[in-house]
Each structure stands twice: as C-alpha cells, then as structure tokens.
Image (spheres, grey):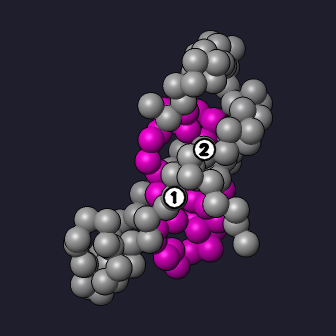
Amino acid sequence: MEEENPERLKPLRFKPGTDKSSGVFPSEEQMKVLQEKAEKKISLLMVECPNPDEWAAKHGAGMIMFYPDRYEYRDPAVREWARRAREVMFDDELLTVAEDRYLTDKELEQAKLKRESGTRHE
C-alpha cells in the first residue's frame, strides 16, 4: 500500500460520474471522447520522446499538474509511458536522476537552480 504524503499531489480519478473535484459528471459517451483525446495526446508525446524519463526530465520541473493516469487507456504502451512519466516528474529523486542524465549543460544548470531554490513545479 502506498504511504500517504500530504506534500505530494494526488491524481484526480476522472472516471464516469466520479469527478467530485469540479462537480462535473461526464457521461460515459463524453468520457470515451475525453479518453480518446488523452490517448492521442500521450501517443504524440511518445513520438516526440519515446523515453518517459527523458520527457519528464525536459518538462517535469515546470509542471504543476500532469494527470495522464486519470484516464483508462486501451493501449498498454500508452498507459505505461504516462504512468512512468508522471512517476518521474513528481518524485524529486527520480527527476534529479533523469535531469542529470538527459539534460544539456545549460538545461541542467537551470534545473539545479530550481532544485536549490525549491521552485520546482511552480
């Protein structure tokens, strides 16, 4: 069982009839459309960068919200890529390792400034 961490953002479960955070209750048909759009978007991100760790390193520090796991993807590769990208983005240790490995010297300098100042995800 996952340990509770109040400082870490939790994903919203956005499934039919359960989006209590906004009071919106999408129909099953609306949910299918949303899921298809999300799956296409993640597929495009995968083409841009097949390695989710690298994608997270390049985009993760500036993200406040990234909830690809709120949807149920049909394609297992999309599901796993989205899960891993989010895992790396919101785990400071994993994100640091990915940044150190995949960023250019200039990008890494910026990332280190954000780490030291505590402004990641702002």
- Residue 58, compared with residue 75, is above or below; it is above
The quarter of the displayed image where residue 3 is located: bottom right
Residue 35 image point, x, y percent: 39, 72
The label nearer to you, 1 versus 2, is: 1
Q: Secondary structure at mark 2?
A: helix
Report whether residue 8 is seen: yes
Query: Which labelled disc corresponds to residue 56?
Result: none
Residue beneath the point at 39% across and 78% down: 15
Residue at coordinates 51% horizontally, 58% vertically from top-left?
Answer: 10
Among the 4 quarters of the image, the one containing residue 49: top right
What residue does disc 2 label?
Answer: 89
- The structure residue drawn at horizontal position 24% and vertical position 78%, both measured from the top left corner, is 25
Q: Earlier in the sequence, mark 1 or mark 2?
A: 1
Three-letter amino acid code of the residue under disc 1: Lys
Q: The N terminus lies in which quarter of the figure?
A: bottom right
Query: In the drawing, does residue 94 fall left or right of residue 46?
Result: right
User: Which amino acid lies under the numbered mark 2 shown in the image of this protein?
Assistant: Met
Q: Which residue sits at x=77%, y=30%?
A: 101
Q: Which residue is mark 1?
A: 10
Q: Position of residue 87 (x, y in %)?
A: 64, 53
Magenta segment: 55-84
The residue lying toward the viewer, choosing from 92 and 7, is 7
Q: Residue furthest bottom?
A: 28
Q: x, y (%) of residue 120?
A: 54, 30
